[in-house]
Amino acid sequence: MPLKAWLAAGVLALAVLALAQEGVDPREEAKRQKQLLLETAGILPTELIVEQGKELFNRKGPSGKTMAECDFGLGKGVLEGAAARLPRYFLDTNRVEDLDGRIVTCMTRVQGFKPEQVKRPEVVAVAFYIASFSTGKPIQVRLLFPQERELYALGEKLFYARSGSRDIGCATCHVTYVGRRAGVLPYADVLGKDKSWTHWPAYRYSNDQIWTMQDRIRACYGNIAHPQPDLYSLPILALELFLAYSNNGAVVEEWPAFVR
Ligand code: HEC
């Protein structure tokens, strides 16, 4: 066999190997890791964080109030299914808020914490706790208020925008390349069948971190060599509303999720 053919065969073999590696379904692998952890530790990190979130939820702030005094969209202290309906417009703040943002509003406006006293890990833990009340619920996000429709339009624009030296954007990976490589799950179809909205908030075993959708989107901004928008910023919120709305009807398998 001529050298060239040998080389081609070698490259092909390597490609097949890589494909086999990638062929491991990340969702199946996450299930396996979860089971493994459960068997060895007897408890999941997600459960520990939910417990921590519950304690924070019931902790009194400087105003003497707990988070049970806050409205997460379905009335004061109602948590059942509330997270599955966020982001949404809130009259009291006159803006659209997601779970993270509404928790900050609760801590500052109702509980009396100063903005600089609000710690991110605490917000995420409370998000885990509140989200846990939406397991089994369908995503139901609406565009009733003009503020919601405007933000949705911005999110859609940002999702399809392309920028940076590589001229790519969210849609490059999450729409254009979805399912391109046969038999593999290269990138999630975040607008459709992969129900990406229901995968966050989550514990990521690959880096042992707890992330909400805000953290997930910021990490993806890193992928496009674009400066990461700040947490709680408008671009993040807009993208969240766009993604959540696109995932309407998807049933939350388990919140918080356990992912790669
Ligand atoms: C260079 C390719 C690339 C670009 C560009 C990109 N992402 Fe991602 N994104 C990924 C990969 C890879 C994952 C992880 C998929 C997995 O683990 O299944 C991911 C995961 C996600 C997820 C979670 C999906 C799930 O089901 O858990 C969301 C949501 C997401 N990206 C949104 C965005 C948004 C919004 C943008 C634009 C700001 C963006 N991505 C840009 C590659 C990209």
Image: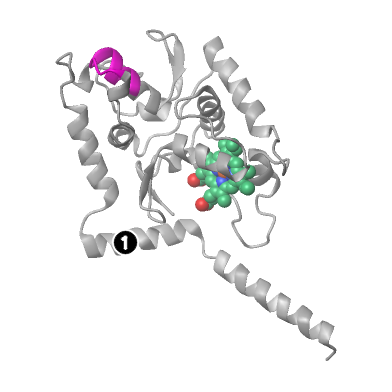
Q: Residue at x 52, y 65 (%)?
A: 24
User: Residue 206, percent across and down?
Assistant: 41, 56
Q: Quadrant of the C terminus?
A: bottom left
Q: Amino acid at mark 1?
A: Gln
Q: Is residue 152 left or right of residue 38?
A: right
User: Residue 252, percent across and down?
Assistant: 41, 40
Q: Is residue 204 left or right of residue 106?
A: right
Q: Which residue is mark 1?
A: 35
User: Residue 194, percent across and down?
Assistant: 54, 46
Where 187 falls versus 15 (above or below)?
A: above
Name the dominant secondary structure of the magenta segment. Answer: helix
Front residue of 252 and 160: 160
Q: Is residue 234 left or right of residue 99?
A: right
Front residue of 138 and 75: 75
Q: Residue at x 36, y 18 (%)?
A: 73
Range shown magenta = 104-114
Ligand 1's quadrant: top right
Quarter of the figure with residue 103: top left
Q: Is residue 152 left or right of residue 114?
A: right
113 is within the stretch colored magenta: yes
Q: Quadrant of the N terminus?
A: bottom right
User: Residue 21, percent across and down?
Assistant: 55, 69
Quarter of the figure with residue 3: bottom right
Q: Residue at x 27, y 35 (%)?
A: 129
Where 259 falls versus 51 (above or below)?
A: below
